[in-house]
Image (cartoon, grey):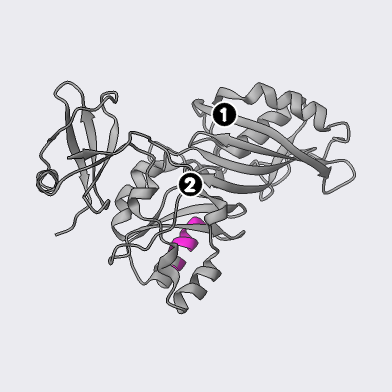
Amino acid sequence: MNRNEQNPRSTALRPQLPTPAADGLLIIDKPEGWTSHDVVARVRKIMKTRRVGHTGTLDPFATGVLVVCLNRATRLVQFLTGDDKEYVATVRFGYATDTGDLTGTPLAPAADARHIGKKQVAEALAHFRGRILQTPPMYSAKKVGGVKLYEMARRGEEIERQAVEVEISELELVGETEGASDLTRDIEFRVVCSSGTYIRTLAEDIGKHLGIGAHLVRLRRTRAGQCNISQAVTPERLAELAEAGAAEQLIIQMAEALAMPEVILNAADVVKAEHGNAIRFNGNWPAGTQVKLLDERRQLFALAEYRPENQTLQPRVVLIEK
């Protein structure tokens, strides 16, 4: 049994030829106006498989990175949804909307935001870096009592929501432009945040800090975990490549997709792990660390949990299908 270097993150994903079953990830550049479900449906048709899922919803008006899992890789969704995200967002100062974005109805006439400039916004952004509390918006897919908040909002209902802690690790000003009217002002910023952060709410809260209504008018996800926009392909381009028999070259192998430590097992230990048996291993990770189990061909076949008390790797998800 060999152990690879215990480095949980690589600098970039490298597209490789997939396994014969075409298991792996596609990084899709979601077009504006499409729902995440629309993208999944389109990928199913293009790749000719029913087993397709995604690792994090984007609102229809948003664009950018949508990580799509194919076939056996759909079992990895639960391990990818918690990855940090990076966005470029544009907030319009002058008025708020009932949805927190450009799709909503203004809550009041536009106020004069011409005094809002780079200096004021840069100072405001400093207050939102680090761990902050954020109240989920009513127009969100978060469930309360089994009902999605946006379903309540569409019925005209509003309930009290509990604030949750999120982390804004990076937040910086990109630029400013004139808004949609003489009174409004648009400011663009880049944000790196924990999963579950609402950029619409962040935009509104920045406006509140500055004493003026605000809402999100553009949002582009540029990274989700290790998946970067530079690797993304539009649905149209994916269809073109599929027609030419070249779509599978875009698939990211499952082993490359997860930012976890990895262990390479010999054939005998692979058989043990396939049957759910713990593997003896002397690691130096904290208890409960998720570990990728690879075979000698460096193919991911299982995910395990490290147990330092008895120095074992306990398989939790086995990806081999019999």
* Picture coordinates of residue 189, whole percent (x, y): 70, 38
* Picture coordinates of residue 19, whole percent (x, y): 29, 62
Magenta-colored span = 35-42
**From the image, which quarter does the C terminus lie in?**
bottom left
> Where on the picture, by quarter, is residue 186?
top right
Q: For mark 2, what is the residue?
A: 12
Which of the two residues, 100 or 195, is positioned nearer the viewer here? 195
* Picture coordinates of residue 114, whole percent (x, y): 88, 36
Image height of 196 relative to 18, above or below: above
* Picture coordinates of residue 241, whole percent (x, y): 49, 73
The amino acid type, in three-letter code, at marker 2 is Ala
Residue plotted at (57% across, 29% down): 168
> Where on the picture, by quarter, is residue 98?
top right
The amino acid type, in three-letter code, at marker 1 is Ser
Task: Inspect this view and state whether residue 186 appears.
Answer: no
Q: Secondary structure at mark 1?
A: strand
Label located before the other in sequence (2 or 1): 2
Residue plotted at (83% across, 44% down): 177
